[in-house]
Image (tube, helix red, strand yellow):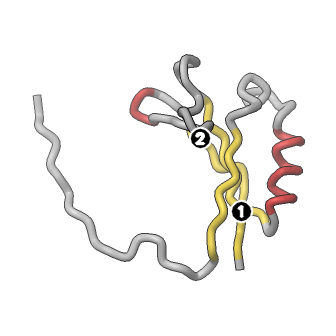
């Protein structure tokens, strides 16, 4: 079964919202704010939520910065461990 996560990105810098392939880009370290609006049972329901949210404060300024992300329920997405690299203290 698939579910559809709906995200909105508010960009701190208005210079670039999409890459050459028209995919949304963001960098939280640069101040971009990624919000999850909800998880929906169909892409249609997620699209309907975009229509509703698109006229609300905060979202209205960046109407093209919604992203629907399809996920399969009960499937592992991170199957390996990871290594922590310590930050250099300045």
Using the rendered view, name the quadrant where residue 23 is placed: top right
Using the rendered view, name the quadrant where residue 73 is placed: bottom right
Instruction: For label 1, count other residues whose C-alpha is less than 10 Å away and answer few (under 14), some (14-19) or many (20+).
Output: many
The number of numbered discs placed on residues in the rendered structure image is 2
Instruction: For label 2, count other residues whose C-alpha is less than 10 Å away and answer few (under 14), some (14-19) or many (20+).
Output: few
Left or right of residue 2: residue 82: left
Query: Callout 2: helix, strand or loop?
Result: loop
Left or right of residue 60: residue 22: left
Q: Which mark is residue 72?
A: none
Which residue does the numbered mark 1 point to in the structure image? 4
Tell whether label 2 touches label 1 (CB within 8 Å).
no
Give the residue displayed 86% in from the left and 31% down from the top.
55
Q: Provide residue 26's location: percent of width, then percent of height.
A: 51, 35
Look at the image and tell me in which quarter the N terminus lies.
Answer: bottom right
Q: Observer-nearest residue: 89 or 72?
A: 72
Farthest residue toward the front? 20
Disc with the residue nearer the chain's start (1 vs 2):
1
Q: Provide residue 85's location: percent of width, then percent of height.
A: 17, 52
Look at the image and tell me in which quarter the C terminus lies.
Answer: top left
Left or right of residue 79: residue 61: right
Which residue does the numbered mark 2 point to in the structure image? 23
Query: Callout 1: helix, strand or loop?
Result: strand
Comparing labels 1 and 2, the label whose residue is closer to the camera: 2
Left or right of residue 25: residue 53: right
């Amino acid at each position: 079964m698939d579910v559809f996560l709906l995200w909105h990105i508010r960009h701190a810098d208005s210079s670039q919202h999409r890459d050459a392939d028209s995919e949304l880009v963001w960098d939280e370290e640069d101040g971009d704010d990624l919000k999850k609006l909800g998880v929906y049972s169909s892409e249609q329901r997620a699209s309907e939520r975009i229509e509703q949210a698109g006229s609300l404060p905060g979202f209205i300024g960046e109407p093209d910065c919604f992203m629907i992300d399809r996920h399969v329920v009960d499937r592992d997405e991170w199957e390996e461990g990871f290594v922590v690299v310590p930050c250099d203290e300045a």
